[in-house]
Amino acid sequence: MAQPNGHNLDPNGSKQHAAFYDSNLYNANAKDDIDAASLPQTDKTRWRLIGDNGEQRWTYLKTREEAVAWPQSTADKWHLGLPTDLPTLPRPKTPLDSLTNALTFFEQLQLPPGQWACDYGGPMFLIPGFVVTWYVTNTPIPSEFRVEIRNYLFELQNKKDGGWGLHIEGDSSVFGTAMNYTALRLLGVDAEEPRMVRARGLLHSMGGAVNGPHWAKFWLSVLGVCEWEAVNPVPPELW
């Protein structure tokens, strides 16, 4: 199963890249030599959250004029971790005071259609599926989305061993590591970027992507780097 960069994701890849185990590039205790500040960033003051009939999507304003004409809402700022400039609420003295404070705060986060936005950020296997789909359908990925998806995945990379788990608090697994490594490569991250080297070395140490579960093999087959024979068939009646 060849990756777009020519590296293999199958168990044989561990032989071809045995140097990973002999060098300090694959070292569970190695300190990341790239911090978040060194990664490309977008201007967070230009992001806007749109809520339409229950759908939530972010859009990025390209120019300063657009940003001035469409000011950020309190909800935009809060979800982006920016200062909201909301007044400090009085310290509650009774349970009713606490409820009043909660309502006062959350009403500021309500989107115009009436719903509240939320972050569906626990699973680590959703974004790779979107990235693979964009890639195989030749759907352009806006540069600002590429930047923030890369930053998000690197932020959630396991600092101990360089992999990814099934979810944000999970131990590194073949599934999480293979899929998020693949997503980052498709998003343009160089194969020899130190964090990618660590992730690839860990993946090889776990036997490669062929040891991943059904969904890993499915997405890699959709991408064309895995043979469909590796995917366990699922009778439609089970769905």
Image (spheres, rainbow, N blue to C red):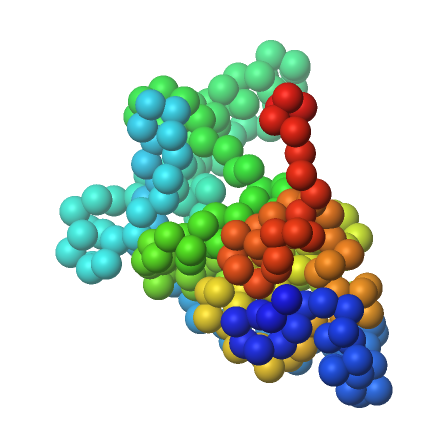
Q: Which residue is drawn at 63% across and 41% down?
A: 122
Q: Is 210 displayed left or right of 152 in the figure?
A: right
- Please indicate, yes or no, whether residue 127 appears anywhere in the rendered image: no
Return the x and y of residue 186 as percentages of the image width and height.
48, 65
Check the image and name the residue furthest to the front: 229
**Residue drawn at x 73%, y 75% as measured from the top left:** 13
> Residue farthest to the top?
96
Percent from the top left, x then y, of residue 204? 77, 70
Give the percent coordinates (x, y) of residue 36. Answer: 56, 69
In front: 206, or 98?
Answer: 206
- Residue 70 appears left or right of 80: left
Q: Between residues 52 and 178, which one lies in front from this camera angle?
A: 178
Quadrant where the N terminus is found in the figure:
bottom right
Q: Say which residue appears at 65% left-offset and 14% top-offset.
A: 95
Quarter of the image holding residue 227? bottom right
Which residue is depicted at the point 66% across and 60% down? 178
Query: Can you say which quadrant of the picture contains the C terminus?
Result: top right
Number of residue marks: 0
Q: Is residue 180 left or right of residue 206?
A: left
Q: Is residue 79 visible?
A: yes
Residue 102 vertical placement versus 130 (above, below): above
Front position in the image: 237 or 181: 237
Residue 123 shown left or right of residue 72 in the figure: right
Q: Where is residue 55 in the image (x, y as percent from the top left)?
A: 38, 30
- Examine the image and state in which quarter residue 136 appears: bottom left
